[in-house]
Amino acid sequence: MPPSPRDETPDALVIGAGPAGLMAAEELARAGRSVVIADAMPSPARKFLMAGKSGLNLTKVEDPDRFRAAYGEGAGPVPALVEAFGPAEIASWAEGLDQPLFTGSTGRVFPVAMKASPLLRAWLARLDKAGVILRRRWRWTGWHEGTCFETPEGARTLHPHVTILALGGASWRRLGSDGAWVPWLREAGVTVHAFRPANAGLGIDWSPHMAPHHGTPVKGVALDAGGTRHRGEFVVSATGLEGGGIYAVSRAVRDGADLYLDLKPDWPVERVEERLATARGAIGNRLRKGLRLDPVATALLMEFGRPVPRGSGLAALVKRLPVRHAGLAPLDAAISSAGGVAWESVDPSLMLRARPGAFVAGEMLDWEAPTGGYLLTACLATGRHAGRAAAAYLEAQKAARKDPRSLEQSAFPEVDPQIITRRHAMHETLRAAIDKLDAGDWEAAHEASQADPGPEAAWLHAHLHRVEGDEANAAYWYRRAGRDPFPGTVEEERAALRDAVSA
């Protein structure tokens, strides 16, 4: 369909046709608004389709608190938004597109068809029926007396009443998320944090003896990094380690934590030592017969544990095998990215403070999450929130033309007030933890710091490791808290901590 005059001044322009952009467009169309979606690629939602090739994991059914905690500190309102539009709501939405679902043994939710394409076709058909116009191969080039694009028909400038930016992060450039928008937003006064790889594999320069194991899955082990412990499968590839188990700890590794493997996570070290002592033969045979390690686990121990110790040292190595690596895979090889538009640059409706009428959704915002349904859930939830907020903004502007005082009374969709209640509860828990630390109960304070994913808890966690003299762990948790190590005394830091959680 060639461009029409209707394209020039739509009620709403959505830039980016991934899940966040499509969801925002749907909310605006539902509100009766004319909507144009512009996407640089020849077809929409390419990353969504690629993710669905091995089974489209829409969301995950689990305890709501655990689900929200997966987004970690620094996620802004994302935990509250996925509470408003989470696994149950996404399942209902997908079933409304005539896509039957099933829930796997781990709680992950998939379409029965497993692929993304049937759901996407049904979704695009519903948007088309609602009057939404999709413009392919329209590449946004910034704001210059309007919203400008390079198109197959030449340069075009649109003048929408509101804009939703949903251009993705900076991973998988070939699928459309190239981060080219960063300079234009910075020029407009928006803070954009540098992109970093998330959910990425580890690069390892293997010795030749690992070649027979390339492509082999590693099962039944636990991964430890920076206080994060995860049990999940991963794969030995020709260039390193890949898969969900690695992705789950990639954030901690990226932020500087060392990575360890526990090859017998269900056994205490004493049992490992006992079984190794009673087994006979060379080390390989003892690992196989005494511990029942499979060949790939044994190969990893030999690779990372050389020179392999004897006696209790070998048992300790089985339980805490250090992984030597060259760091995470490059950003373009990562499944997703961390970084993006800073939360202080948007208001609670996800509108840019520096550019009223422009909203942001999806992976453009500065949040991250592990794979397993969390990424897609947050993209859909932020797109829904931004679309609803943009529709409310248009209504408010319309009312203001009749009565300017109405803007003072208008209410845009904001974060659920329960997030403030939860924050107060977390602060109360942290104040109690500091009291316990003052009373000499380090373990109770440490346990409380681990139960809260927020930055104040990360700061307390750093302080606790500083108190015990573990400088490496303290440095890691200061980074997780987004702050430099405290320059004053332990007593001064504890007083500052108490002030922070009493605000």
Image (cartoon, helix red, strand yellow):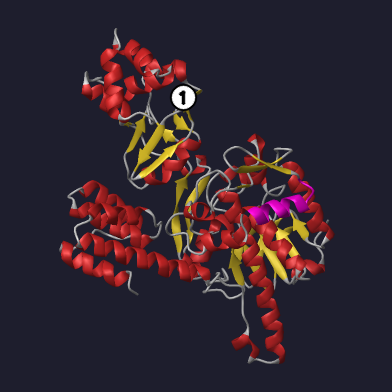
| Residue linked to disc 1 | 238
98 inside magenta stretch: yes
Q: Residue at x 67, y 82 (%)?
A: 396
Q: Residue at x 36, y 31 (%)?
A: 262
What's the magenta region? 88-99
- Name above or below for residue 191 compared with residue 43: below
Where residue 392 sits in the image (x, y, percent)? 67, 75
Where residue 54 sits in the image (x, y, percent)? 64, 35
Where residue 421 sits in the image (x, y, percent)? 47, 70
Is residue 304 left or right of 297 when viewed as pictured?
left
Q: Main secondary structure of the magenta part?
A: helix
Quadrant housing the C terminus: bottom left
Along the line of sight, the residue nearer the viewer: 46 or 79:
79
Q: Residue at x 25, y 15 (%)?
A: 277
- Name above or below for residue 7 compared with residue 209: below
Q: Amino acid at mark 1?
A: Ala
Quadrant housing the N terminus: bottom right
